Image: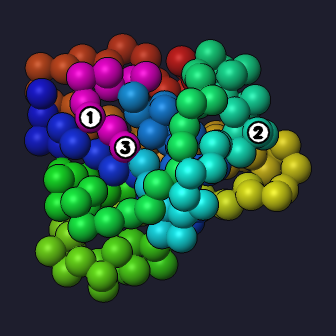
C-alpha cells in the first residue's frame, strides 16, 4: 500500500458527489480504505436515486450507501481528504487545523470544482461524474505507490 491508504471524500449532503467519487476510487483501488461524508450530511439517507442509476450504468453499485456527517474521527484517521470545492477544503481546515496539508479539492490539479448535481437533471449528474473521473485521473500517481501499475485510465473503466 502507498502513502494514502485511508481516503475520505467529502461533499455537502453525502448523497451525490462524494458517494460517486468514493465508489469510483474503491473500484479502482480495492486495497485502500475509502469513505465518504458530508459537511451538512443528510444523515441516514440513501444516495440520490439519479446518482445510483447513473453509477449502475457504469457497473458501480452505490445503492447501499447511507449518508454520514464528517467528524473528528473520520478526518483524523484519513491520510487524504478530497473535497469537491475550495470552500469545502477551507471549511475542513478551519474546523480541524491539523488537516491542513492533507485536505485538497478533488479537482486540485485541474483547478476545478465539481458541480453539485443535487436536484438537477441527469445531464448535470453525468457532468459531475465525468469531472470527478477527470479529476481523479490526476491523482493516480499520488495515490498509487511506486509498485502499483495502473494500465487504464478511470475514464476507460468507468
**Label 1 sits on residue:** 33
Vertical position of residue 118 compared to residue 72: above or below: above
- Give neighbour class at mark 1: few <14, some 14-19, many 20+ (Cα, 10 Å): some
- Extreme residue toward the bottom, this view: 94
Is residue 121 covered in magenta? no
Which one is earlier in the sequence, the residue at label 3 or at label 2?
A: 3
Residue that badge 3 annotates: 35
Task: Indicate left or right for 144 with 67 as reference.
Answer: left
Question: Which residue is located at x 38 percent, y 80 percent?
Answer: 90
Tag 1 and tag 3, C-beta contact below 8 Å: yes
Q: Could you tell me which residue is drawn at 24 percent across and 77 percent down?
A: 96
Instruction: Decide if residue 137 is on the left or right side of residue 11.
Output: left
CA distance for labels 3 and 2: 19 Å
x then y, percent, for residue 126: 74, 40
Q: Quarter-wise, where is residue 27 in the image?
A: top left
Q: Is 121 on the left-hand or right-hand side of 141?
A: right
Q: Is residue 137 above or below residue 97?
A: above
- Identify the disc placed on residue 49: 2
Q: Distance between the residues labelled 1 and 3?
A: 7 Å
Amino acid at each position: 500500500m502507498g502513502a494514502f491508504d485511508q481516503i475520505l471524500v467529502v461533499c455537502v449532503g453525502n448523497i451525490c458527489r462524494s458517494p460517486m467519487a468514493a465508489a469510483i476510487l474503491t473500484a479502482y483501488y480495492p486495497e485502500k480504505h475509502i469513505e465518504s461524508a458530508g459537511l451538512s450530511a443528510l444523515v441516514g439517507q440513501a444516495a440520490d436515486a439519479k446518482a445510483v442509476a447513473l453509477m449502475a450504468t457504469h457497473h458501480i453499485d452505490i445503492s447501499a450507501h447511507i449518508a454520514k456527517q464528517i467528524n473528528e474521527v473520520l478526518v483524523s484517521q484519513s491520510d487524504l481528504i478530497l473535497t469537491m470545492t475550495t470552500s469545502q477544503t477551507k471549511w475542513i481546515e478551519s474546523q480541524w487545523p491539523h488537516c491542513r496539508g492533507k485536505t485538497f479539492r478533488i479537482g486540485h490539479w485541474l483547478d476545478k470544482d465539481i458541480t453539485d448535481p443535487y436536484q438537477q437533471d441527469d445531464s448535470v449528474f453525468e457532468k459531475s461524474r465525468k469531472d470527478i473521473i477527470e479529476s481523479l485521473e490526476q491523482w493516480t500517481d499520488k495515490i498509487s505507490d511506486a509498485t502499483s501499475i495502473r494500465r487504464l485510465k478511470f475514464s476507460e473503466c468507468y
